[in-house]
Image (spheres, rainbow, N blue to C red):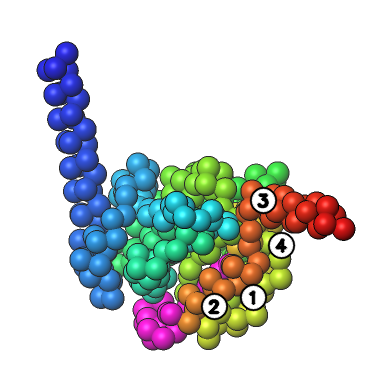
Amino acid sequence: MLQFKHSLLLLLLFHTAVKAETVANACHQISDKLSSVSYKECFSNQLTNSGHSSNQNLPLLIKEYPPLNRRKPQARILILGGIHGDEYSSVSVVFKWMNTLNKYHSGLFHWKVAPLINPDGLLRKHSRRTNGNGVDLNRNFSPGNNKSASLNYWKKRTRNDKRRYPGPSPLSEPESRWVQQLIEDFKPDAIVAVHAPFGILDFDGPHKAPKHLGPLHLKLLGTYPGSLGNYAGIQLGKPVITIELPYAGIMPTRQEVSKIWVDLVRWLKRNVKSSDAKKQLVKAESDITTKNNRID
Ligand SMILES: [Zn+2]
């Protein structure tokens, strides 16, 4: 029995070591590619291997900033970077925001942050928009009832633009399957997706969109079948905030990175409450009403 326990412990230690090594390898590759993210910065974030891999078998990493004891989070927020592998700044900026969260996570929100959804696209010699299978992940989500909508749109409207290939069928790619599963399991109340290089802010879903976040002003671009905005914003009715940084290869200034973050958190705080939090609020309000009635 003791020996069994020993083996189990060794196996557990081995698994933990393998996982840490996988994250270390990924961080080496990310910091080799992105001049604004150092190995130390990447590794010290304690990203975890989600257990899911890309088409080319690279690990899909995630970091959770869980609820804290002292406070019930107002909502769950999911942040996604690097869905397009050639939008370097969209990964680096998410790392900068993680630095902020590492220092100041207050429990106001329950966050999950995945800085690089498309490692195949970023970490190849010549980075590209699509994944290892040549699929635009932001066209590979579920398009709703009409399963061929994404492919039809691609053929008719983009004239078979290779950079926007939605894949042979919705969710054909492990990266988009992972993100969609993450959305179903985590049930975020809002999703923030970072892209480049249009220098604007796009928005899908309910709620009044923010007018601007830092220097980025609202410009509604509309959605495409198979895009995250279409899937999560239109079909699931969740607010999807798409941040389009001004340059794919040049970072915004530190002040801009910080201003976008501060405005984003402020907007989320004012506008996004999870259904559980809302229920609690209604209960608290009805308690107050009851009390007041009693006083009357
Ligand atoms: Zn993009």
The stretch drawn in magenta includes residue 252: yes
Check disc 3 and report the residue beneath it: 280
**Within 8 Å: ligand 1 and the Cβ of disc 2?**
no
Label 1 and label 3: CA atoms lie apart by: 26 Å
Q: Residue at x 50, y 77 (%)?
A: 262
Q: Residue at x 71, y 66 (%)?
A: 207
Q: In the rendered structure, which amino acid carries the disc numbered 1?
A: Pro
Check disc 4 and report the residue beneath it: 206
Q: In the rendered structure, which amino acid carries the disc numbered 2?
A: Asp
The answer to whether 54 appears left or right of 233 in the picture is left
Which mark lies nearer to you, 1 or 2?
2
| CA neighbours of label 4 inside 10 A, class few (<14), some (14 to 19), many (20+) | few
Q: Earlier in the sequence, mark 3 or mark 4?
A: 4
The magenta segment: 241-258
Which mark lies nearer to you, 2 or 3?
3
Check disc 1 and report the residue beneath it: 210
Q: Residue at x 17, y 13 (%)?
A: 1
